[in-house]
Amino acid sequence: MGRNRRQKLNSDRRRRFRSKSPDSKLGRKRATRGRERVKKITRFRRHPLNRMNLGVLVFGGIFVYIIILIVLSSQTTSIAGYEVKLGRLAVRTSSRGVAVRNEKVYYADVAGYINFYARENERVSSGALVYSIDESGTLSEMMDEGRAVNAELGENDLAELKSEISNYRKNFTDRDFSSIYNFKYTLLGTVAKISNASLLAMLNSVSTNAAMGNSLDMGYADTSGILVYSVDGLEGISPAEVGKDTFNEESHAKKQHMENSLVEKGEPAYKLSTDENWSIVVPFDETWTDELKDGDYINVRFLKNGDTSWARMSFLHNEDGDYLQLSFTNSMLTFATDRYIDIELMTNEKKGLKIPNSSLVEREFYVIPKEYLTQGGDSDKNGFLRESYLEDGRLSAEFVEAKVYNETEEGVYIDISVLEPGDTLLMPNSGDKCTVSNRAKLTGVYNMNNGYADFTRVNVLYSNKEYSIVESGTNYGLSVYDHIVLDGGSVHDDDFVFEQRKKTE
């Protein structure tokens, strides 16, 4: 039983082995069916993009974009731009001048203690008491006692002092700090003269005393005029004598005697300005020529108080320079105590296109007679007919396109890169010729409206330290809202530019 089972199992193994063998009939049939199945499989061709990784594609595009940016940045300049707008500039013709008046100085006849009885910067009549000089000092003691009794000031006196203080505070500037000392002396003198006015009765009683009257010298005005108690050494100077030394304020500082101070015989006591006609002389600035050439009178503003007055102009050619004399017929009383006066000439404001001075550049151009300018080629663009020779040696003419930057009576202005020096140009419909040689400069700016630096001529009307006013509506010129290069020296002709930021005023 067991033997028969083993034989059956061995027989089954041999049969299965023979069926798998390719040499057996059953194996060959199975192999044939397998090949037939393989022949029925169709292989599809894959698209090349399917083989590429999506990440590689994305990073490849970014890389190409970066390369393009690098190339463009190497050919393009990033600059600051300025948008042109209409504007105006006030012509700043401020100056510090020296006052020239008809002044007469009066000197002390004796030595002693001086006291004043008339108010400074006011008109005194002929024969009015101005000062007294006490040789013994007795009068000074009596006046000190009188001041102690009459120490209070009236309302009018206080109002005058307040007015002087208020005006000084209003016009005070740090750059003229030294004026505070003049104000101190003026204020002290005003207070003393207000006090002395109430002691005139005492003075009259003293002068009747024969013993004391002999030691008292009385000073009376011999003519009417504006009273000033200070002197500076420039009294009597004429406009033709004004020079650089005249404006040395340290050499011509005010000298003034205080109330009850000791004076020597022959020292200046006071002075009178006897004429309402006076002048201010200022150094002449050549930039004023265009502003002042067409008039005889000009409106002047006094910086001390803001008042204005018309003055007649006279041009002086003094020994050490040119000066402008401004003659007035009023306002002398207001400035009688001032030798140096700050003024501003009220000229008209300049209006036009306002641009920064940093944008201005100069370029050189060929100047060609207008008769040689023509149109040709395949368009209506401007250009010239230049004489040339063909390969066979025959004389011919070629059209050279050229942009016109300006046009004057002398001719049209052409970029020097278009033509060569010595080129011969032919006049259209004529046998005339000219040789390229004449050059001239133009002032202009670089227009950047089209993405490149394009020179544009400007006509400057007026300039200050920062800005210029240029004429609007000119041929080949600027227009409102044009964008120009803020720093004209940072670019060259035809540079590709893009505006980093816009700056307007």
Image (spheres, helix red, strand yellow):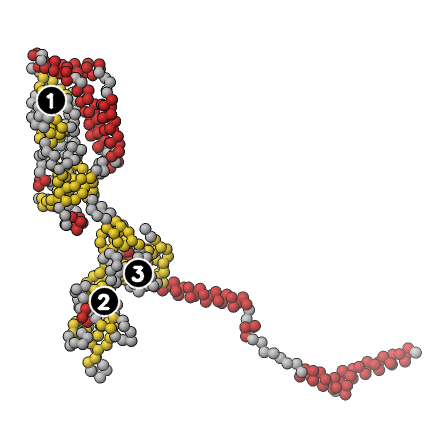
Query: Which numbered disc flags the more N-terminal residue, 1 or 2?
Result: 1
**Crowding at mark 2 (Cα within 10 Å: few <14, some 14-19, many 20+):** many
Callout 3: SS: strand
Position of residue 494 measured from the top left corner of the image (x, y, whole percent): 30, 65
Q: Please name whichever residue, 350 or 29, is drawn nearer the observer in this view of the structure.
A: 350
Callout 1: SS: strand
Is 242 positioned to the left or the right of 8 in the image?
Answer: left
Where residue 129 is drawn, which disc sits there?
Answer: 1
Quarter-of-image position of residue 230: top left
Which residue: 9% across, 46% down?
317
Q: Is residue 338 visible?
A: no
Where residue 108 is drawn, which disc sits there?
Answer: none
* Tag in front: 1 or 2: 1
What residue is shown with label 2?
414
Q: Please name the amino acid that badge 3 sits on.
A: Asn
Where residue 447 is drawn, which disc sits there?
Answer: 3
In contact (CB < 8 Å): disc 3 and disc 2 = no
